[in-house]
Image (cartoon, rainbow, N blue to C red):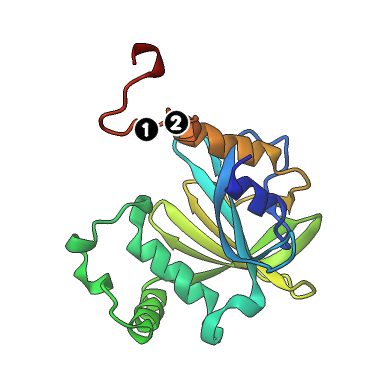
Amino acid sequence: MTERDRRVRNADLPAYGLPADVPAQRRIAGMDGMVMTGQNTFHAATLGLRHNRPDGTWLTITVCRRDSRQGGHDPLDRLAWQLTRFPGAVLDLDAAPRWAARTPEELHEMQRQARTELPTEAAQILVDGTTRPASLLRAGADWAGYVPIPEQAFDLELLAHRWPVEHLVISAVPDLAPYLAGSRADLGPLLMPRRPRLHRGFVPTATR
């Protein structure tokens, strides 16, 4: 088990993804937070799960702890910035100098500006059997969504490429094993044990 596996399994934030019977390759999209000193717990601010299909469509569902937002900034501003900054999840920063923020204030202003470029749509998304109001932003084949969960300490943020939002169903994930296995498969040889590095001048015992 890798250190990332341990942190994901010990995170104090629930994970949300697609129901197990929805076909997709699964992996951990990312996680942010801190290790709790003296405890076997990872205090997570965000925990994201990624779902990929062979045709290139993908969907990321991120659980975001509400009290982790700095300055109370609107999550839709940040999602709009991600859609505008990462069209198709690819960006050459040198080719888009307008996104080269130098301070947090500049970054927040860029996020607000990105929001003005994308219209907001209202939607309904089924989460754990309950229909939730959601706000959507679209940019070409990409879309982002924000789903408030007011009775919990977290909300859901979605990013997708050509994944249909109609009839989307999201549910809590009780077993992260398929996502952890998918992440390990993506890394492949990087997780294989490395051969010990021999120091210059080392002579094997059998030949001494």
Mark 2, Cα crowd under 10 Å, few <14 / some 14-19 / many 20+, is few
Question: Can residue 48 be seen from the camera position used here?
Answer: yes
Residue 204, x across and y down, in percent: 36, 19
The residue drawn where x is 71% and y is 50% is 9
- Secondary element at tag 1: loop
Asked whether, in this view, residue 80 is left or right of residue 131, the answer is: left
Question: Can residue 54 be seen from the camera position used here?
Answer: no
Residue 196, x across and y down, in percent: 42, 30
The residue drawn where x is 47% and y is 68% is 79
Quarter of the image where the N terminus is located: top right
- Amino acid type, label 2: Arg
**The one of 189 and 64 positioned closer to us in this rendering:** 189
Location of residue 42 by image quarter: bottom right
Asked whether, in this view, residue 170 is left or right of residue 157, the answer is: right
What residue occupies the far front of the structure in this picture? 208
Residue 109, x across and y down, in percent: 36, 84
> Contact (CB < 8 A) between labels 1 and 2?
yes
Where is 182 relative to 17, above or below?
above
- Dot 1 corresponds to which residue? 197
- Secondary element at tag 2: loop
The residue drawn where x is 74% and y is 48% is 173
The residue drawn where x is 53% and y is 82% is 70
- Dot 2 corresponds to which residue? 194
Where is 191 relative to 160, above or below?
above
Disc nearest the viewer among 1 and 2:
1
- Amino acid type, label 1: Arg
Quarter of the image where the C terminus is located: top left
**The one of 58 and 133 positioned closer to us in this rendering:** 58
**How many numbered discs, if any?**
2
What residue occupies the far top of the structure in this picture? 206
Location of residue 26 by image quarter: top right
Residue 4, x across and y down, in percent: 59, 49
